[in-house]
Image (cartoon, helix red, strand yellow):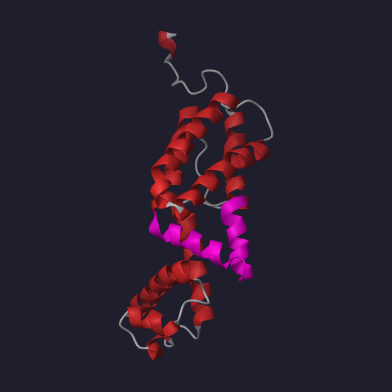
Amino acid sequence: MANDTKERILEAALEMFSQKGYDGTNIRELTASLGLVKSSMYKHFENKEEIWNALLDKMIAYYAQHFGSRENLPPVPETLDELVGMTMRMVDVTIHDEKIVMTRKLLTIEQFRDERARELATKHFLTELKEMFTYIFEGMMNKGLLRQDDPEMLAFAYTAPISSLIHLCDREPEKTDDALAQIKTFSGHFIKTYGKNNANRTAVPSGNE
């Protein structure tokens, strides 16, 4: 029961922090939203800062499990078409998973106040995403799917516009469908530009060649 209450506090904190920011979140309002008195919170957390850090720990693990990380890398695609499919699955998760959306919003708000939030924002919005796709593109080059190039620069060129469109969805949710269409079109353009001819074709059995 104690663990359930602790999880409820963290879930409510994620929602409030993502909407009001750290300074705008009041502990009394937070506990009242759960039907608790303020003193009940202190059985689980000493103060708001401890809630904040516990929440970030929880969401780092959640993000790595559901989206990926440098320790949890996706498999390298076997075809160019698989790259498009993998990209759209990753985008779908990051746009539609409510916990990931709220985490991205709170990091965007708090990156200018909190050092840890700033480091996590840089990691999730830039460096780790670039590292993941550097690994993916290097693997695709080794498989002969992409022409030889600097995989890190390709990863930066690929992820930057997609990340910008994801943030657009956060700011203007009504544009989500259009942003998804643009991402898919961009991914297709990327493989036409950097993919090797016929690399996205399914292999034909040798007996039919």
Magenta-drawn segment: 97-126
At horizontal 61% and vertical 46% (from top left) the residue drawn is 130
Q: Nearer the viewer, residue 168 or 144?
A: 168
Main secondary structure along the magenta-highlighted residues: helix
Viewport quadrant of the C terminus: top left
Q: Where 37 sits versus 63, above or below?
A: below
Residue 65 spot, x, y in % from top left: 45, 55
Residue at (56%, 68%) from the top-left corner?
110
Q: Position of residue 141 (x, y in %)?
A: 61, 30
Q: Which one is nearer the viewer's eye here, 34 or 145?
A: 34
Relative to 77, is 123 on the left or the right? Answer: right
Identify the residue at the far right of this view: 150
**Residue occupying image coordinates x 47% and y 71%:** 20
Seen in the picture, residue 157 relative to 11 is either above or below; the reply is above
* Apparent side of residue 27 relative to residue 118 in the rendered image (left or right): left
Question: In terms of image quadrants, where is residue 203?
Answer: top left
Using the rendered image of the protein, determine whether residue 144 is visible from the camera's viewpoint: no
Relative image position of residue 167 (x, y in whole percent): 51, 51
Count of numbered circles on the image: 0
Image x and y of residue 60, in percent: 51, 62
Q: Residue at x 51, y 68 (%)?
A: 57
Q: Is residue 28 magenta?
A: no
**Residue 116 in magenta?**
yes
